[in-house]
Image: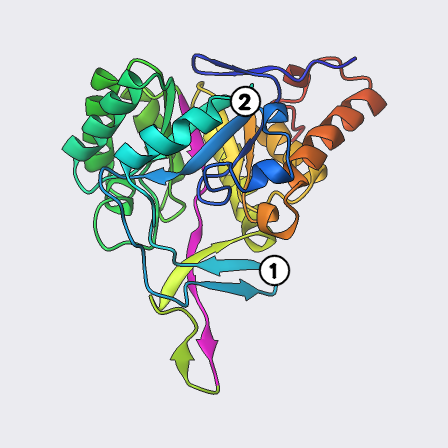
Amino acid sequence: MVNTEVTIGKLTLKNPVMTASGTFGYGEEYSEFVDLSRLGALVVKGISLKPMEGNPPPRISETPCGMLNAIGLQNIGLKKFINEKLPFIKGFDTCLIVNILGRTIDEYVRLSTELEASGLSAIELNVSCPNVKSGGIEFGTSQKALGRLTRKVRKAFKGTLIVKLSPKVSDIREFARLSEAEGADAISLINTVPAMAINIKTRMPVLSNVTGGLSGPAIKPIALRMVWEVASAVKIPIIGMGGIMNASDAIEFILAGATGVAVGTSNFRNPASVIEIIDGIESYMRENGIKHIKELIRGIIC
């Protein structure tokens, strides 16, 4: 028997595996294939105050080692999420983390307070989406803006506050330290990497948005390096993500410093991958005589 329980802020997760926002919807479709109660946490698709249509198609394209997307944060809006999606998700025995996004600090604050009033105990600040023209990544690439946003939301929200960082910065450790100093309970990283593809027959960009975010195995070495760097810069828990396709990938992130891991692109290839990763981590622990997952966290030997 191995113990995979981890603590992220005020949350206690039965295992370190969660879904990456934007890749698992609101859990409904996947519930036909996956026992959501086995997840350490379910991180739902990003929510804004008002519904957003996202970018026009085409907005997804497969790449040799991953996926390029420019969804543009399409979502149903806060009111519909609370009234129609939240009751379904609450029926499962897993932690729930809601990814939130806004164009202004006031929008982030209002989202966090209204979600807290509806019984939500954990939010993830999306400050790193590369596929919208305003808000989001504007906070994630300015230390001054990120500091003000984190401070304001921290003051308004008493639950677990996670800040999702962008790889589009010169030194991600500085943004991690700032988030910790302003009251974040945890940091998640990385979001997709800005990228593009061109159709040589039409000579046009593959995506209508021209550029998009690259995810999947292609960015795993980048994400892993950033998790390792941030682990030396902060004391709060790190949620690592970026190209985690199997249990071996997840264990690498945990050894590099992640307390939790989020699975994204792999969900599109294999809806059951999150469960297979949970099982794989447990098998690895049994085979290597590791009784508690904490023995692996930040366990890299350099």
Residue at the disc numbered 1: 65
In the rendered image, the residue lying farthest to the bottom is 201
Identify the residue shown where x is 77% and y is 22%: 285
Quadrant of res 280: top right
Secondary structure under the numbered disc 1 in the rendered image: loop
Q: In this orientation, does residue 248 appear?
A: yes
In this rendering, the label closer to the viewer, 1 or 2: 2
Q: Position of residue 170 (x, y in %)?
A: 36, 46
Identify the residue shown where x is 38% and y is 38%: 165
Q: Amino acid at mark 2?
A: Phe
Q: In this orientation, does residue 258 appear?
A: no
118 shown above or below 188? above
Q: Is residue 1 left or right of residue 44?
A: right
In the picture, the disc for residue 92 is: 2
Along the line of sight, the residue nearer the viewer: 208 or 281: 208
The boundaries of the magenta stretch are: 186-200
58 shown above or below 260? below
